Amino acid sequence: MNGLTHEEYVYNTRQDIVTIAQNIIKKNINIIDGCIKINALWDEAELPHDDSYYLFVLIDSDTDTFPRGYLREICSEEYLKEQDEEEKNYLKAFEKDIDEECQKLIKEYG
């Protein structure tokens, strides 16, 4: 924890989540990547396992088959187009909910 108290570490982790949420809303980060990052930090930030939490878990889990990062380099163009379209359609169903949950995180912990 780099010399931080537990409370400072939790606070900093919550601020990291707020920054990610802000970047999701501003479209500065891929929505799925942002949800994955928020999900990974959730317990470290000692946030409750509420509806917000389960939305980020759902997005993380449901989208783990979409090629991300270095995996995109080894996929065919045709496959990437197909997966990108499927991802886009998936996100349409959740974009409003994700934005609302990000707003809640920002309001609560920002």
Image (cartoon, rainbow, N blue to C red):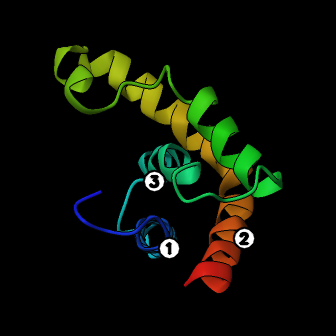
Which residue sits at x=61%, y=46%?
91
Left or right: residue 58 compared with residue 37: right
What's the distance in space between the residues labelled 3 and 1, CA to CA? 11 Å
Does 32 appear above or below 74?
Answer: below
Q: Dot 3: what SS? A: helix
Distance from the alpha carbon under mark 2 to that under mark 1:
13 Å
Residue at x 66%, y 58% (from the top left corner) = 95
Which is closer to the viewer, label 3 or label 1? 1
User: What residue sits right under mark 3 in the picture?
Assistant: 34
Residue at 39% in and 69% down = 5
User: In this image, 68 relative to 82: left or right?
Assistant: left
Type of amino acid under label 1 = Val
| Image marks 2 and 1: residues in contact by CB distance under 8 Å | no
Q: State the residue at coordinates (33%, 31%).
A: 68
> Around disc 2, counting alpha carbons within 10 Å, would you say few (fewer than 14), some (14 to 19), or many (20 or more)?
some
- N-terminal label among 2 and 3: 3
Q: Earlier in the sequence, mark 2 or mark 1?
A: 1
Which residue is the site of mark 2? Answer: 100
Q: Position of residue 22 (x, y in %)?
A: 48, 76
Vertical placement of 63 versus 101: above or below? above
Name which residue type carries label 3: Gly
Circle 3 crowding by C-alpha within 10 Å: few under 14, some 14–19, many from 20: many
| Residue carrying label 1 | 18
Q: Amino acid type of disc 2? A: Glu
